[in-house]
Image (spheres, helix red, strand yellow):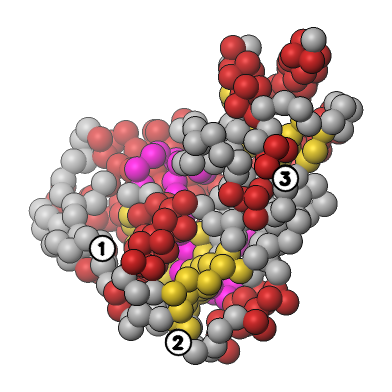
Amino acid sequence: MVYLDHNATTPLDGRVWEAMRPYLQAFYGNPSGLYKLGRLSRSAIDTARQQVAALVGADPAEVIFTSGGTEANNLALKGLAQALPPGLAVAGATEHPSVSEPLRFLEQLGWRVVTLPVDRAGQPETDHLDTLPRDGFRFATLMLANNETGVIHNIGPLAEWVAGRGGFLHCDAVQAAGKIALDFKRGGAHSLALSAHKIYGPKGVGALVVDRSVPLEPLLHGGGQERGQRGGTENVAAIVGFGQAAELALTELEARSARLLQLRQRLEAGLRELPGINIFAERAERLPNTVQFAIAGFDGETLVMNLDRQGIAVSSGSACASGGGEPSPVLTAMGVPADLAKGAIRASLGQDNTEADIERFLAALRTLTSTLRG
């Protein structure tokens, strides 16, 4: 199989599995226990916290482990909303459902959510900041890199706007971490959401990296784990895996990114030879591994299913919002016509992909489009 859907999930790195395995068998102690087995688990969590913090340039004490990126985003947004009086929140127009849906929930509780539009390249229209309401502002949220188009957002202007109004800025960094260099201390955000299974770690574990200045009410109350911010016995093996994956991602970041960019450029060169091709946000700064495109006259889901029959795995958009039959909200926000947006295909490359994978994918697309045209 040619797997080209790494933005949806990545395979578990063998080195990560080896780090996890002892904590699934021999070292099974509850990290809250005072006996040796418990202390071993606690030490492993402490090490993982350091590894995850290093990946994004944060302090270990700023890392709260969660069940994944969705919980991290929910904790950031709902946790802030519970700690602050209801007011105004600003959100990017192309956010992941794990951000847009919690915001919709907050609207039911009396919050006002204003959307910051994006241009045709998927970048936030920072000139629009001057038109946003000033009164009652509490926080803003803007993803660092889009999961569909791969566009890397410039959060600087929004961070300055937020700081000037005494608010807080949350960033969904799930797709950015491990693909581009991050510096939490200097980036301007007050919190970042991360997920292990996007960087060759296990599913079911993520983190919210949060500055100590942020007032945050927990979603899960319990035994006081994670400094009282996330109750429940920690998933030690998964957290260890996350830490190992984060360390590898940081150590290999430059080499991985360079190789993925080379493969992406080869893929895009081949795509441009296809009639009717549209590469979305083609000229924008994007993640090195991500290409979203459409071929005029073809339905994206039809192509995805036909490619699957040939052993090629790609997606028609976000794996967390697929199957609805509607055009991508991300592309709609970018002004892409509905008929073209419905043809969208996302290819997201990973560390095990090869040039042969790219050539096989391109050959399959050429054959399919020729056959389906009749």
Residue placed at 60% from the left, 44% from the top? 328
- The mark that comes first in sequence, 2 or 3, is 2
- Quote the CA–CA distance across marks 1 and 2: 24 Å
Above or below 44: residue 138: below
Q: Start and end of the magenta stretch?
A: 178-206
- Residue at disc 3, secondary structure: loop
Q: Disc 3 residue type?
A: Pro
Percent coordinates x, y for residue 106 in the rendering: 36, 67
- Quote the CA–CA distance across marks 1 and 3: 39 Å
Numbered mark located on residue 219 in the image: 1
**Which residue position holds label 2?**
136
Viewer-side residue, 117 vs 52: 117
Q: Disc 1 residue type?
A: Leu
- The mark that comes first in sequence, 1 or 3, is 1
Percent coordinates x, y for residue 138 in the rendering: 44, 81
Residue placed at 49% from the left, 36% from the top? 324
**Which residue position holds label 3?**
337
